[in-house]
Image: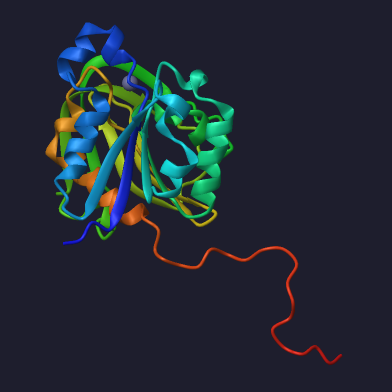
Amino acid sequence: MSKSINVTVWSEYRHEKSHEEVARVYPKGMHEAIAEGLRAYPEYSVRTATLDEPEHGLTQEVLDSTDVLTWWGHMAHHEVSDAIVERVRQRVWAGMGLIVLHSGHFSKIFKALMGTGCNLKWREANEKERLWVINPGHPIVAGIEEYFELPHEEMYGEHFDIPAPDELVLVSWFEGGEIFRSGCCFTRGAGKIFYFRPGHETYPTYFDANVRKVIGNAVRWAAPNGNHEPIRGNVKPLEIIRS
Ligand code: ZN
């Protein structure tokens, strides 16, 4: 099969350098674990980009040739340049897909696209997460059972301050009792956005087969559909206006 979807996996790549616990779980960096899952799809052409590269690895050229961008950030959201956030937002409006992972809920780009605070409840207690498929016909959960579990994750709880998603695909339940909208679809301009909750840096979540399947499906869902970019602004009439 020809490579038809260009994916750029972006990660801040800081915890891995400063926290031994994280480096043990993700010795090549979280971006490499996410990219590895996507490289299993022959039709995806996958590259990575990280915060400390020039322009965070997201030059105009890279973004222009990206169909779907995945985003993991946490401790250094504030270090992402506003100019690059704007560049990413423009690309989403023009049709690039964006998959925002876990603590990316507080990234500048997610907040800019949502227009809300994006805050939530959290707890690090090594607890079980059960993710329920609540939209079984949705392409993002193709091949996923009724639910799947992650034995150890950070808890994120409602209320999650996002606009009502266009489609809600997954809801998480946590051992401590909270629930969370953990698979949310949005559109902004011509671009599709998927927020996917799991992925705390101290757990091997991005090696989990179900998590990889959801991200892999989400890439296909979020990829541009080939539609013409909408024409806006002042236009000539299509018909002769006689009145
Ligand atoms: Zn976390």
Query: Quadrant of the rendered structure where residue 124 is?
Result: top left
Which residue sits at x=31%, y=23%? 155
Residue that extends furthest to the bottom in the rendered view of this protein? 242
Horizontal and vertical percent position of residue 15 = 31, 14
* Rendered location of residue 55, percent (x, y): 47, 28
Q: Is residue 79 above or below residue 72?
A: above
Residue 122 falls left or right of residue 204: right
The extreme right residue here reads 243
At a point 53% along the width and 42% down the height, the residue shown is 89
146 over 237 or under it: above or below: above
In the rendered image, is residue 158 in sight? no
The number of discs equals 0
In the rendered structure, the answer to whether residue 206 lies left or right of residue 64 reads left
Answer yes or no: is residue 233 visible: yes
Q: Which of 66 and 206 is in front in this view?
A: 66
Ligand 1, what quadrant? Answer: top left
The spot of residue 81 in percent (x, y) is 54, 25
- Of residue 43 and residue 216, the one placed in the foreground of this image is 43
* Up/down of 228 relative to 138, above or below: below
The location of residue 13, given as percent across then percent down, is 32, 20
Quadrant where the N terminus is found in the figure: bottom left
Q: In which quarter of the image is the C terminus?
A: bottom right
Q: In which quarter of the image is residue 76?
A: top left
